[in-house]
């Protein structure tokens, strides 16, 4: 396989031009596990490590699955010397770190939001996932798995649309094969999609169906509560027979938002459209007089649950912005203290000469 089979195109070729020399070659990160990387060079997969600190802020910049990198091949160790600018990402707030971003997948075109019909789709979880997709520059597509155990498919699809009324919804069954072709048709040559959903919804099973072989390990869900185990323990990118690429991910328990207010508006376009009619341009749609959004809820033209979700996500983003600002202030003060300490040490050395 060539690197073109993994999504290499003219844009990345142009970005790589300034890095090209006889020692560096382009490669795509296909797996990240506890900091170690596996990359695809077009001539095969090799392991690699990141050179020093690639982040301009002085922090270690981890490569994400889907990244295109400049790789230096060595006799014993292959080293990633640079990460190319990303085009479309899925990122969340890093668990346990309120002011840090974790890139789940890079250079993606679609986010396949996977929900199992064994328990039924969760509209609120779908809303969060689609907001993250839009914010990262990717198109969300809702994929409902296990249609073979669903007794009312139309009702399940309607339930999913409550969380993503403006996104495509595809119902599939890995057992019968129904709907799999509809997913495959979106993953054309040069495109990359990432699977996003909790454990046990059938992400790895769907990947195997699209691959046409049982390459990824899968496990049964618990019969009592339909919850799955973490069969997939690391993110992995695979090239599909149709020419596209797919990133399988472990089940994500915590989908912390890492986005801005504009992304929330994009995920709720009907609210943004109605808000044009509000009396005040800065209306928050909570209790203000002349609020067209609240009037739409009263008249039944806007679902009350959608407004509640919008307000909840907006509040979460506002709190995130406050934490980001506080973190930046701490970083500035730390740099000032460090600089002041350095000045005092220099002055001390001069004084003792």
Image (cartoon, rainbow, N blue to C red):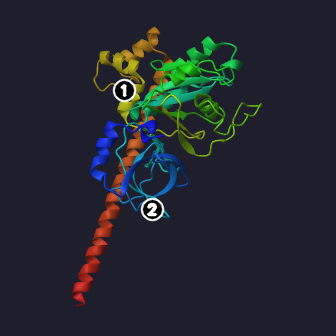
| Relative side of 264 to 280, left or right | right
In the image shown, does 108 or 42 lie closer to the viewer? Answer: 42
What kind of element bears circle 2? loop
Expressed as whole percent of the image width and height from the top left, the position of residue 36 reads 52, 55
Which mark lies nearer to you, 1 or 2?
Answer: 2
Expressed as whole percent of the image width and height from the top left, the position of residue 12 reads 34, 41
Q: Is residue 68 above or below residue 154?
A: below
Res. 284 mark: 1
Query: Is residue 291 something one can see in this rendering?
Result: no
Q: Earlier in the sequence, mark 1 or mark 2?
A: 2
Query: Is residue 174 something one can see in this rendering?
Result: yes
Expressed as whole percent of the image width and height from the top left, the position of residue 178 reads 62, 18
What kind of element bears circle 1? loop
Crowd around label 2: few <14 · some 14–19 · many ≥20 (10 Å): few
Q: Is residue 43 above or below residue 87?
A: below
| Relative side of 212 to 185, left or right | right
Crowd around label 1: few <14 · some 14–19 · many ≥20 (10 Å): some
* Quadrant (top left/top right/bottom left/bottom right) for the C terminus: bottom left
Do callouts 1 and 2 mark residues in contact (Cβ within 8 Å)? no
Residue at 22% x, 85% y: name it.
Answer: 350
Distance from label 1 to label 2 (Cα)? 57 Å
Expressed as whole percent of the image width and height from the top left, the position of residue 300 reads 47, 10
Residue located beneath label 2 in the image: 74
**Residue 261 in which image quadrant:** top left
Residue at 34% x, 45% y: name it.
Answer: 85
Q: Is residue 301 above or below residue 238?
A: above
| Relative side of 176 to 276, left or right | right
Outermost residue, right side: 224
Residue at 49% x, 16% y: name it.
Answer: 303
Residue at 77% x, 31% y: name it.
Answer: 224
């Amino acid at each position: 396989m060539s690197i073109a089979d993994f999504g290499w195109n003219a844009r990345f070729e142009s970005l790589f031009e300034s890095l090209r020399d006889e020692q560096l070659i382009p490669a795509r990160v296909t797996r990240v596990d506890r900091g170690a990387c596996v990359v695809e060079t077009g001539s095969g997969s090799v392991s690699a490590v990141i050179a020093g600190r690639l982040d301009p802020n002085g922090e270690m910049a981890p490569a994400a699955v889907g990244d295109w990198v400049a790789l230096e091949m060595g006799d014993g160790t292959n080293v990633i010397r640079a990460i190319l600018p990303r085009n479309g990402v899925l990122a969340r707030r890093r668990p346990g770190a309120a002011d840090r971003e974790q890139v789940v997948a890079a250079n993606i075109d679609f986010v396949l939001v996977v929900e199992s019909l064994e328990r039924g789709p969760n509209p609120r979880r779908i809303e969060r996932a689609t907001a993250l997709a839009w914010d990262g520059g990717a198109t969300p597509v809702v994929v409902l798995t296990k249609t073979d155990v669903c007794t009312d498919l139309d009702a399940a699809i309607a339930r999913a649309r409550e969380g993503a009324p403006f996104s495509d919804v595809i119902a599939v069954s890995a057992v019968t094969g129904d709907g799999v072709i509809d997913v495959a048709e979106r993953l054309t040559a040069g495109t990359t999609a990432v699977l996003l959903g909790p454990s046990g919804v059938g992400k790895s099973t769907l990947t195997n169906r699209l691959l046409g072989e049982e390459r990824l390990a899968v496990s049964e869900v618990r019969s009592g509560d339909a919850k799955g185990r973490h069969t997939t323990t690391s993110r992995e990118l695979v090239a599909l027979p149709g020419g596209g690429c797919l990133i399988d991910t472990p089940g994500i328990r915590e989908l912390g938002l890492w986005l801005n207010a504009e992304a929330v508006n994009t995920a709720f376009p009907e609210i943004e459209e109605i808000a044009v009619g509000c009396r005040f341009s800065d209306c928050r749609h909570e209790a203000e007089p002349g609020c067209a959004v609240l009037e739409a809820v009263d008249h039944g033209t806007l679902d009350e649950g959608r407004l509640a979700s919008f307000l909840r996500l907006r509040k979460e983003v506002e709190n995130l912005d406050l934490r980001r600002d506080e973190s930046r202030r701490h970083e500035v003060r730390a740099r000032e203290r460090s600089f002041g300490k350095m000045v005092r040490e220099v002055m001390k050395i001069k004084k003792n000469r």
